[in-house]
Image (cartoon, grey):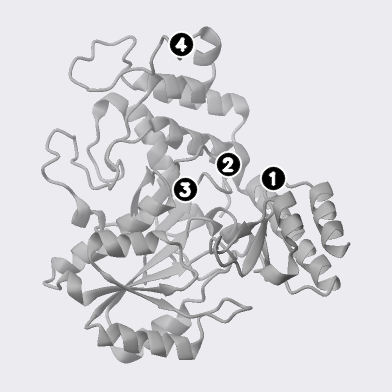
Amino acid sequence: MPWPPLSAQQVRERVHAALDENRSYRSHDILGLPGTLLDPKVFPATPDILARPWLRTAVENPNHIGCHTLGDSEPAFRGTHDLEREVIALCAETIFGAEPGTVDGYVASGGTESNIQAIWAFRNAWRAEGITPARVGILCSVDTHYSLHKAADLLGLTIVCIAVDRCSRAMTPAAIEAALDHFEAADCTHAAVVFTMGTTMFGSVDDPEPLLSALDRRGIPHKVHIDAAFGGFIYPFTTPDTPLTFADPRVHTVTLDAHKMLQAPYGTGIHLARKGLLAHTTTTTAAYVPGLDCTLIGSRAGANAVAVWMILQTWGSAEGTRFVSELADRAAHLAHRLRDLGLHPVHTEGMNIVVLPEEEVPQAVSDRFLLVADDHDRPQWRKVVVMEHVTDDALDAFVAALAS
């Protein structure tokens, strides 16, 4: 998945060139668009701000409504739309193994929106074949992100969650069969299958084969969505042979979150979908939008797409791999040290999350280090996430506190 880094000067020049290609509310006569610059009284366009490409983008406020990989888009912002198209191609093809030109996508508001977008497209694709929503169900692990429950509620679908082994967090064969019995008993005939690359609580990564094989044995048609909101910018780099990519033709859609491992501003997710799927969520009544709109969110801040482009191009694949591999290695070392204390951490190789049973973490230690529980009312687990700001000194202090 190699791509070369650009120098800071190259990044600046490219973003400024894209902004120069946009129509500007400041220097062009734009009468028909309902947007404008950020409030100049509060966010004045001073020379130092305009010299900085991301701040200039934020002030100039380009709207990235629609999906720019499909064809027509709002011509006023074609320069920064091009940068978003490059982000989608890099993520889909270079990181997630798609063939060139086979995946559409857009910079979304986050993983929640992207997960809902995927299930929405699946439901509508089947509805176009005469399958009613009552026949469509979501199949996922109990560790799957809560946004899939939102998707089921919003789209009127049944959701069936599959139990997992307590330590490995893998869906067990018995649990898969029990879940499919439940699925069929609910009169569901078509499955929107969700596999997670880096679950929110455990950082675990689903193995797709046991569930997909069981679905094939039962003759249940299915479409596959990969929720890589947390793991998408770490696991493919630390574990390049992961099967959860577009290299598997059974994978239809992928979610990533740039505001986690990629350190972009919050509100920056990425939705990827094989060509043809987003047609099923196109809103034809959005006739005033060039190219119409197939996205859940509609209008979006172009500055977030530019931020993702700048980060990816500045890092390049080699430095990005080094960065996330170091985090994963430090998490693995932490898990080893905790086992040496006689504790029972859960850690997925190649990921940067370490989880301990609730009973092994004194409340004072959890409070001091702001550990997150799986359930605030009835906690069973507490997690550590090794991010860039988490120093070795902080991890040493954490281990010492548990050992005392």
Residue behind mark 3: 90
**Label 3 to label 1, Cα distance in Å?**
23 Å
Element carrying mark 2: loop
Where residue 225 sits in the image (x, y, percent)? 38, 65
* Residue contact at pointers 2 and 4, CB within 8 angstroms: no
* Residue contact at pointers 2 and 1, CB within 8 angstroms: yes
| Residue drawn at x 78%, y 46% as measured from the top left | 391
**Label 3 to label 4, Cα distance in Å?**
31 Å
Q: Which mark is residue 37?
A: none
Residue behind mark 2: 263
Residue behind mark 1: 388
| Residue drawn at x 50%, y 8% as measured from the top left | 46
Which of discs 2 and 3 lies nearer the camera? The answer is 2
What's the amino acid at mark 4? Answer: Ala
Q: In the rendered image, which quarter contains the N terminus?
A: bottom right
Residue behind mark 4: 45
| Chain-order first, disc 3 or disc 1 | 3
What's the amino acid at mark 2? Answer: Gln
**Label 2 to label 1, Cα distance in Å?**
9 Å
Element carrying mark 3: helix
